Amino acid sequence: MPDTRSAPGLAAALTPLLPELAARAAEQEEARRLPADLAQKLAAAGVFRMITPKRFGGLECTPREIVEVTERLATANASAGWCAMIGATTALNAAYMEPVFAEEIYGNPMIITGGVFAPMGKAVVEGDHYRVTGRWQWGSGSANCTWLCGGCTIWENGEMKRLPSGAPDARMMVFPAADAVLHDTWHVMGLKGTGSGDIEVKGLRVPKGRSVSLVADTPHETGALFKFPAFGLLALGVCAVALGNTRGALDAFHDLATVKKSQGSSKTLSERQTMQEAFARCEANWRAARAYLYSEIDRVWTIAQQPGEIPVEVRADLRLACTHMTRTGAEICRTLYDLGGGAALFETSDLQRRFRDAHAITQHIVTAPSTLELTGRILFGLPTDGGMI
């Protein structure tokens, strides 16, 4: 098994996998999920352990390392990068969960976890357990998981519990994947290879110690990674997939433009001035958004390694950079798809898949347009609930 005890070891283990991920992108789309053998190879490389605390044998990578790895994966295959990102970010639960329960789940180096944060379920208090019923959409990569989680509102004595802010008390319930039903609902336009169907449980008993709130709980782990805002980490994962997917689109257009000639023309696309200008603009926009993103990552990481909390304004700046990268990536992929002409329409073209994947990524709630409203309020100095930033 490759050395997965360090980020450099992870990077080295990934390198030989990238060509296979790229070559099997169409197969993955056809299957509408990450093939089980690829999931196992990614697990053996340590991809799903990037955020897992070192206490449980995880890598506990820096945020920059997490984004760099996810970017490389998504450059090869965005759906594979997405599944890797979901598995890695879901493991953040290990830092918040009671250690005895976290060890049971995350102590196995080949474990893959997944799930959905959105509180689409209901958990009723029953002594030291919850009785959980729910159905969650967007369960990316669930078919390869051993453990899953689903967000639930908490109910006791017939009433929904609330936090001091007045918001519903919501927690993620972690349960064996074998106890859930996976519904094949993933018939979509983009990120088709992520297997993001529905997860359902009915009347399942979950120990309270196997539940997590990223809003109300304090991490048991003290490493700087776990001072980093939880939703900021998720947003970083999402935009890292957008970052790599866009790089893949730029590379695909470059390859096409050097050989394709428009009908009736003796020049390749790369020899036409309009194409040269448009491609240069796309490249510059990608580099600028990437530089902005990594600059904010490094800034927040520096603060996270120091005593004290990370100011809400700084957390908002990170979220703004994530949303900007995601939406800029979609714009670039749209432009490159247009520039590719009729050749980009065919399923054999990387450009059409990159275009579809880019616009699927923009729909995630942590990089959706509503995040611009949230960060805009903070930029204007208006009162804002910072719990989800």
Image (tube, grey):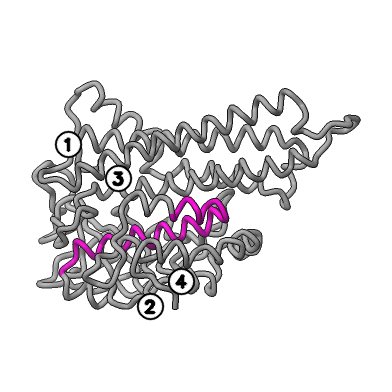
Mark closest to the chain's N terminus, 2 or 4: 4
Residue drawn where x is 13% and y is 49% of the image: 162
Q: Main secondary structure of the magenta part?
A: helix
Whole-percent x and y of residue 260? 80, 39
**Label 2, label 4: how far apart the Cα atoms are:** 11 Å
Q: What residue type is disc 3 on?
A: Gly
Q: Would you identify the image quadrant in which residue 221 lies?
A: bottom left
| Mark 1: few/some/many CA within 10 Å (<14, 14-19, 20+) | few
Mark sitting earlier along the chain (3/4): 4
Specify whether residue 341 is painted magenta. no
Q: Which mark is residue 311?
A: 1
Q: CA distance from mark 3 to mark 4?
A: 25 Å
Q: Is residue 48 above or below residue 164?
A: below
| Contact flag, marks 3 and 4 (Cβ < 8 Å) | no
Residue 144 disc label: 4
Q: Residue at x 27, y 38 (%)?
A: 299
Instruction: Name the disc covering residue 178, or none.
Output: 2
Task: Give the magenta range.
Answer: 69-98
Q: Quadrant of residue 93?
A: bottom left
Q: Residues within 10 Å of mark 2 (few under 14, many from 20)?
A: few
Q: Earlier in the sequence, mark 1 or mark 2?
A: 2
Q: What amino acid is labelled 2 in the image?
A: Ala
Q: CA distance from mark 1 to mark 4?
A: 37 Å
| Residues at marks 2 and 3 touching, judged by CB atoms closer than 8 Å | no
Percent x, y of residue 354? 60, 46
Q: Gap between marks 3 and 1, in whole Å?
A: 13 Å
Residue at 24% across, 78% down: 104
> Is residue 70 part of the magenta span, yes or no?
yes
Q: Where does the image place residue 43, in percent across and percent down from the top left?
A: 43, 71
